[in-house]
Image: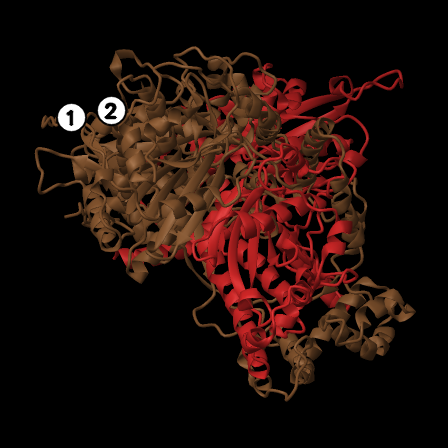
């Protein structure tokens, strides 16, 4: 009875889901927590019944099924109370009319869900809170966002419009009684919470965005600079999300639930504390493997889910505001339900599409960099497809226009052609993996998935723009060919996953392995133990446990080896001759054991004793902690001279970031007065300046495999049945829905970017293979002449000659991998040209296009492309050209 | 991973407490903010003052210590904590009862309180994610540990992972859940054994049933029992050291769970040639040292990066020599005049031998340094100042002292050109400004070449346009030159592949030249340039093309 949509895999595409994904698996709950009234459910898709008078028996809507099941399930437990279902809406069978809904009995789990959404103790924090719960049975994932509300234009109790209470009778009354005055005491309270949080939020985000525009070392100083904007983005991300700077609220801190109606006048009135929470509950597939796959997909793609949840939230806000204007109560509820159900329908559809839509099974770029053995075949196929495409749109320069747009906006290719300064490791002509980025990832971990998402959306320029490409066309084969070719130019990094092999015995995650594997001593129970003290037999084995434990800490090394490690470390840091340290050895071993067996009872307070009376011997044998300079640096609080900070640029950025933080903090402290709490962390901080005991870092075997759930696979879509708002690239047969949604999607992207960083502009390249047109749609231009979506793309001469010569070489039967190498060389030329443009623009107020053409060989048609490329390495370019 | 892990406990007497916390310190660590300045946790107080909800503030350590029982404590107060160093990355993992970084103290406290007394997890044991921008984001897993003496025979704990990057933390959910479950399972199993053990010795249920309930004794008894530490519950004497290892490993493994392969562009030919030359030199050097029998040869450090700067000044000693110098191509052009400059650069680009003869080695070398920029590194063979003539195959740039004779076969050859630098006789010895080269020297250019130098190559025509445009800075001109060189190097590569590797016929070659844009006016010069530049390709590149053709050839046939 449920609406199940199965996916048929076409040859060129694939999908994650091995089985059906039911739309009804997604449930929406809106709850409010009011200081006075307590908690109320404002919406629960599980307790809403769609009335469809035209087809009363075979109802296609999945929700009906769910509520039906729910009812029968409830009937077994409690006597049915059907009176609780309140029937609203007209009986009209007209299909054009919006559907009618009715409330059914509230779901049995709704109280528990409320507890989970708000927590058992309410929080005073005014920003939005994000929560994820895992419900074991039935297996479900629940994502909640809790917002403070911002009111206006109505009574504080106005949200009762949407309430249905746990008590069905009351709910019935509420739905029917007109408890809402048409217009009464409007409440407005946007300023208070806003200004408080806003102060820090805005200032900090400003300092961050200024950081994002940090220029690289002067262009032209070194062409082989390894520091690309890709590197810089990653470095800044690791800093912006670093724990070491403490909580640093970023750009959209004060996100609230907005219930103020701009169309009505509002009077300031009493402030009411009210929170509204939105939860999406996704039922997990029952089969273990499907469950696992969905969860992996869900968590790796969370930013996309969240972005759609934000869209849903906005729709709910609007529904609440709009329905308040309606005087008649039953109609008001109906409008509210309709609007929310519609938004939920959208959400379900988007999520379904995201999970189920076909993908390009072999994106050219990613395949090429991951499998070097089939490189020749891949190159051959790629060039063949590109040649066919070139022939197809020869007259209109379709391919050249499309590639101009793609290279201008999906900018991740730039860092893949920036010349490396390092000697090649493998073959001379293969691109090397960036070692600077690799090093960065190890020492300052950032989220590779986030980096990949930014790459795909081309968010590497300045200001940050994000772009998607949609290929429209009725001819499936042609669209798929375009997608295939573009999957070479829309680039991102490849992700590898490193996991622990299944069934590994010595897993470092388990702290008690030695005892669980060797349980014999505990089994023998001593005759008369003191319940408060460790049993005698355990004390007897403690030393053995210690030894096996230490050995366990680093698999494959014994205790002796352990001490060796520590001793060599000591040698390297202290100037004492080696003869001394060997002399020291027995004591050292003893002390090591004592300190590891930290239980002061069993070793007679040995450790504290040792530390209190530090012998000269102990002074010599210090435990090694990091480098001496680092320790010193930790001690001096204000020092900016970061130890081990080798690179000049690194330090510069550090200082900038730090001084930004400082500035912010000093302004913070001016607001808040001092408090005794401050002393506590400082005291603790001071107390721990002594040297810690060094333990070896456990390691364990990892298996490396290509990551499946990454954006490089998921956001390069195939020929999809419907327009998708998330994909970096995909094809559709008709632009009908695209036209409906695109502008709103682009605006949403700017407001709630999945990228989790501020975005200046959202763009979409729309390539129409039927009309052979390429347009760019932007979030910044609302109206376009002639009712068209966007602007036509001007073909860059550089791109045109680039494609032409590559394809001509291919036509002359030159080896395809050489042609691809040549293509890369030509792209590198574009990069070099952007460097000269950037240098030309430095200090220039006006751009002489003619001069550019004569002197630099840059034609006016190339300027948009080159300026975009230049903005990735020279952020000032954007300012000059604006 | 940019996160910390903490073990928290809901103490029956004292409520939620942080027991043990492992943080990661990253290498070029900016020092922690000055304790005197406000710590970001300040905003918590603001929230407290409003008096709603639960008090989140961290208790001052003094009160907390007084309030601590064995159950709230992990390491004794005097214990310095643990550290593990990841030698590869320099990240240090530190464990203490509380986070050592002051700004994280309240963050962890908040996470602890929320995980154990605010957030609701169905079944009380399990994972939750929660958080906000102000307090950070938390992945929490709550669990029970068996205790024969506790109320309900169990105690409640949680492990929290705190990070500022919520997306990263959420992405890591499956990984963290999998491994924290193992950690928790291991703790629970161990405690269960202790529990069973204790129960078999002294069944508490019976004790409690039999002991008469006396209100006077009860609270005392309870508080005594509340003091059991996790070490005692697991009978694991090295519990904290082991937990430190587990948590450190978790942070490391979570941070390196996903790695990126991000490609850069292939190095330019200039870079490759420079690297090749450097290795050759180093091999030569080590060869010399080996011959001398010095057993200890300090490994010449492989320079990590070669900057384009290096090849422009690779003879390096320019600064040491006093006197006037050429500063740029534009400067050289100004001094020589457009015609002579054109001739000179034409010869340079065609690969002819360019001989400068004069008394000032500094000036000559500066001229070579400027001119070298016109060519790929691989095409430059310079002898900057020599007392005798060197053959053309040895060098295309040759500096000679004024009295060195030029052999007849050279001076009559169209493949060479000579620049004679004459000192201008001056009466006074007044120091003249270095810039004013013309007031000091006179330049005579001669060549047996009869071919016109004003048609091509295209590259030269374009460079001259840039040089003659005074609006363009020297930097722009040099970037422009670099673009042109790279552009023509790419043509060279194609021609090399086509004619040398594949051995195609003349007709096809002509097609390729046309598609490369080398035909038209100045075609002859363009082709000469391409052929000369081919000699400058790196060995690596050439050998790669040679080997890869044999592969593709076999696969294609």
| Residue at 63 percent of width and 43 percent of height | B56
Q: Colour of chain B?
A: red
Residue closer to the observer: A779 or A680: A680
Direction from residue B266 to residue A738 in the image, left or right: left
| Residue at 72 percent of width and 49 percent of height | A644
Which quarter of the picture shows residue B106?
top right
Quickly name the residue at label 1.
A90
Q: Is residue B503 visible?
A: no
Q: Is residue B327 above or below residue A278?
A: above
Q: Of the numbered discs in the image, which one, if any, rests on residue B123?
A: none
Labels 2 and 1 touching (C-beta < 8 A): no
Residue closer to the observer: B89 or A544: A544
* Colour basis: by chain
Dot 2 or dot 1: first in sequence order is: 1
Local SS, label 2: helix
Q: Colour of chain A?
A: brown
**Rendering coords of residue B130 (x, y %):** 50, 45
Subunit under mark 2: A
Quickly name the residue at label 2.
A330
Residue closer to the observer: B135 or A469: B135
Local SS, label 1: loop
Which quarter of the picture shows residue A645?
top right
Query: How many marks can you see?
Result: 2
**Rendering coords of residue A355 (x, y %):** 30, 46
| Residue at 60 percent of width and 70 percent of height | B149
**Rendering coords of residue A617 (x, y %):** 89, 71
Direction from residue A31 to residue B380 in the image, left or right: right
**Rendering coords of residue A620 (x, y %):** 87, 67
Task: Using a 10 Å C-alpha cutoff, classify the residue at mark 2 as few (fewer than 14 neighbours), some (14 to 19) or many (20 or more).
Answer: some
Which quarter of the picture shows residue A408?
top left
Direction from residue B514 to residue B543 in the image, left or right: right
């Amino acid at each position: 009875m449920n609406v199940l949509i199965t996916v048929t895999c076409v040859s060129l595409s694939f999908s994650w889901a091995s089985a059906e994904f039911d739309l009804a698996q997604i449930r929406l709950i809106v709850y409010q927590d009011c200081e006075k009234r307590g908690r109320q459910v404002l919406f629960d898709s599980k307790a809403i019944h769609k009335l469809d008078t035209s087809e009363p028996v075979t109802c296609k809507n999945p929700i009906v099924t769910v509520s039906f099941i729910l009812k029968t399930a409830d009937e077994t437990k409690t006597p049915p109370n059907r009176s609780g279902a309140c029937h609203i809406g007209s009986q009209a069978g007209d299909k054009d009319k919006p559907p009618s809904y009715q409330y059914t009995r509230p779901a049995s789990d709704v109280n528990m869900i409320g507890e989970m959404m708000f927590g058992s103790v309410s929080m005073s924090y005014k920003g939005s809170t994000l929560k994820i719960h895992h419900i074991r049975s039935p297996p479900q994932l629940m994502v909640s966002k809790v917002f403070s509300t911002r009111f206006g234009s109505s009574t504080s109790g106005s949200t009762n419009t949407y309430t249905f209470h746990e008590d069905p009778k009351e709910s019935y009354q509420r739905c029917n009684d007109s408890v809402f005055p048409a217009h009464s005491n409007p409440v407005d309270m946007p300023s208070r919470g806003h200004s408080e949080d806003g102060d820090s939020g805005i200032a900090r985000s400003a300092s961050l965005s200024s950081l994002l525009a940090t220029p690289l070392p002067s262009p032209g100083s070194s062409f082989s600079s390894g520091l690309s904007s890709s590197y810089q983005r990653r470095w800044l991300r690791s800093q912006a999300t670093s724990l070491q700077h403490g909580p640093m609220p970023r750009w959209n801190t004060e996100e609230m639930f907005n219930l103020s109606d701009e169309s009505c006048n509002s009077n300031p009135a009493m402030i009411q504390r009210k929170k509204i929470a939105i939860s999406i509950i996704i039922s997990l597939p029952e089969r273990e493997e499907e469950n696992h796959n969905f969860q992996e997909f869900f968590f790796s793609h969370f930013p996309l889910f969240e972005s759609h949840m934000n869209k849903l939230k906005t729709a709910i806000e609007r529904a609440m505001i709009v329905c308040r204007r309606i005087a008649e109560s039953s109609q008001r509820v109906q409008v509210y339900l309709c609007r929310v159900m519609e938004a939920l329908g959208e959400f379900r559809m988007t999520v379904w599409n995201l999970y189920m839509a076909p993908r390009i099974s072999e994106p050219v770029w990613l395949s090429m960099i991951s499998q070097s053995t089939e490189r020749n075949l891949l190159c051959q196929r790629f060039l063949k497809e590109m040649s066919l495409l070139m022939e197809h749109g020869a007259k209109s320069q379709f391919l050249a226009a499309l590639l101009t747009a793609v290279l201008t906006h999906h900018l991740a290719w730039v860092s893949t052609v920036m010349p490396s300064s390092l000697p090649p490791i493998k073959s001379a002509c293969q691109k090397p993996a960036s070692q600077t980025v690799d090093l960065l990832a190890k020492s300052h971990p950032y989220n590779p998935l986030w980096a990949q998402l930014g790459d795909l959306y081309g968010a590497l320029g300045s200001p940050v723009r994000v772009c998607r490409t949609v290929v429209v066309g009725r001819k499936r084969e042609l669209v798929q060919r375009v997608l295939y070719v573009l999957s070479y130019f829309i680039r991102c990094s490849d992700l590898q996953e490193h996991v622990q092999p299944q069934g590994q015995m010595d897993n470092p995650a388990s702290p008690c392995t030695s005892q669980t594997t060797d349980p014999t001593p505990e089994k023998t129970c001593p005759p008369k133990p003191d319940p408060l003290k460790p049993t005698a037999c355990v004390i007897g084995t403690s030393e053995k446990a210690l030894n096996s434990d230490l050995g366990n800490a680093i698999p494959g090394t014994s205790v002796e080896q352990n001490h060796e490690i520590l001793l060599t470390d000591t040698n390297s840091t202290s100037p004492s001759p080696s003869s001394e340290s060997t002399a020291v050895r027995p004591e050292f071993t003893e002390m090591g054991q004592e300190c590891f067996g930290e239980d002061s009872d069993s070793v007679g307070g040995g450790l504290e004793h040792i530390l209190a009376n530090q012998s000269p011997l102990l002074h010599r044998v210090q435990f090694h902690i990091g480098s001496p300079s680092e320790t010193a640096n930790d001690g001096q609080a204000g020092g900016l001279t970061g130890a081990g900070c080798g690179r000049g640029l690194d330090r510069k950025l550090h200082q900038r970031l730090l001084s930004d933080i400082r500035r912010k903090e000093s302004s913070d402290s001016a607001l808040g007065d001092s408090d005794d709490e401050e002393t506590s962390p400082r005291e603790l901080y001071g107390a721990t300046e002594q040297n810690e005991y060094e333990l070896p870092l456990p390691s364990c075997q990892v298996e490396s495999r290509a990551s499946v759930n990454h954006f490089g696979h998921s956001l390069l879509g195939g020929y999809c049945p419907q327009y998708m708002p998330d994909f970096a690239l995909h094809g559709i047969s008709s632009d009908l829905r695209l036209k409906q949604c695109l502008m709103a999607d682009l605006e949403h992207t700017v407001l709630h970017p999945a990228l989790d960083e501020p975005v200046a502009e959202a763009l979409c390249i729309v390539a129409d293979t039927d009309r052979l047109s390429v347009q760019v749609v932007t979030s910044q231009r609302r109206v376009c002449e002639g009712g068209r979506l966007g602007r036509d793309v001007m073909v860059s001469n550089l791109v045109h000659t680039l494609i032409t010569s590559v394809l001509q070489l291919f036509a002359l039967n030159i080896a395809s991998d050489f042609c691809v190498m040549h293509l890369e060389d030509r792209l590198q030329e574009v990069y070099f040209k952007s460097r000269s443009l950037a240098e030309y623009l430095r200090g220039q107020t006006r751009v002489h296009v003619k001069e550019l053409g004569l002197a630099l060989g840059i034609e006016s048609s190339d300027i948009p492309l080159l300026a975009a490329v230049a903005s990735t390495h020279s952020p000032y370019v954007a300012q000059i050209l604006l | 991973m940019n996160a910390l892990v903490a073990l928290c406990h809901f103490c029956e007497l004292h409520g939620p407490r942080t027991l043990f916390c492992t943080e990661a310190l990253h290498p070029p660590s900016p020092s922690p903010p000055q304790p005197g300045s406000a710590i970001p946790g300040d905003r918590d107080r603001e929230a407290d003052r409003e008096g709603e909800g639960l008090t989140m503030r961290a208790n001052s350590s003094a009160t907390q210590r007084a309030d601590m029982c064995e159950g709230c404590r992990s390491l004794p107060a005097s214990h310095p904590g643990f550290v593990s160093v990841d030698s590869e990355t320099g990240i240090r993992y530190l464990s203490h009862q509380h986070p050592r970084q002051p700004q994280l103290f309240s963050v962890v406290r908040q996470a602890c309180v929320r995980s154990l007394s605010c957030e609701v997890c169905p079944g009380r044991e399990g994972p939750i994610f929660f958080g906000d921008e102000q307090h950070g984001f938390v992945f929490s897993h709550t669990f029970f540990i068996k205790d024969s003496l506790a109320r309900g025979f169990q105690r409640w704990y949680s492990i929290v992972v705190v990070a500022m990057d919520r997306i990263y933390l959420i992405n890591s959910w499956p990984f963290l859940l999998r491994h924290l479950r193992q950690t928790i399972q291991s703790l629970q199993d161990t405690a269960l054994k202790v529990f069973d053990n204790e129960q078999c010795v002294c069944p508490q249920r019976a004790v409690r049933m039999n002991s008469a309930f006396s209100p006077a004794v009860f609270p005392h008894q309870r508080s005594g029992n509340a003091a059991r530490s996790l070490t005692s519950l697991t009978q694991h004497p090295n519990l904290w050291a082991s937990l430190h290892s587990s948590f450190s490993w978790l942070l490391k493994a979570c941070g390196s769970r996903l790695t990126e392969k991000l490609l850069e562009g292939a190095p330019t030919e200039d870079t490759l040639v420079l690297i090749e030359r450097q290795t050759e030199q180093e091999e030569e050097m080590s060869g010399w040292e080996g011959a001398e029998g010095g057993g200890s040869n300090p490994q010449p450090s492989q320079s990590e990066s070669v900057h384009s700067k290096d090849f422009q000044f690779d003879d390096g000693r320019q600064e040491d020599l006093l006197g006037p110098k050429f500063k740029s191509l534009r400067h050289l052009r100004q001094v020589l005049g457009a015609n002579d400059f054109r001739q000179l650069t034409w010869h340079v680009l065609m690969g002819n031998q360019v001989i400068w003869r004069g008394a000032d080695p500094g000036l000559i070398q500066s001229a070579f340094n400027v001119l070298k920029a016109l060519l790929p590194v691989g095409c430059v063979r310079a002898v900057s100042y020599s007392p005798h003539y060197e053959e053309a195959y040895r060098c295309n740039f040759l500096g000679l002292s004024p009295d060195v004779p030029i052999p007849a076969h050279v001076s009559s050859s169209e493949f060479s050109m000579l620049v004679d630098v004459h000192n201008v006789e001056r009466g006074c010895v007044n120091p003249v400004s270095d810039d004013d080269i013309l007031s000091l020297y006179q330049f005579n250019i001669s060549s047996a070449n009869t071919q016109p130098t004003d048609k091509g190559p295209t590259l030269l025509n374009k460079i001259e346009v840039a040089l003659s445009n005074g609006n363009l800075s020297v930097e722009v001109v040099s970037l422009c030159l670099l673009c042109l060189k790279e552009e023509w190097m790419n043509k060279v590569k194609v021609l090399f592949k086509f004619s040398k590797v594949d051995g195609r016929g003349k007709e096809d070659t002509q097609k390729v030249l046309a598609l490369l844009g080398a035909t038209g006016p100045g075609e002859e010069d363009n082709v000469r340039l391409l052929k000369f530049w081919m000699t400058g390709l790196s060995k690596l590149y050439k050998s790669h093309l040679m080997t890869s053709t044999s592969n593709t050839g076999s696969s294609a046939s």
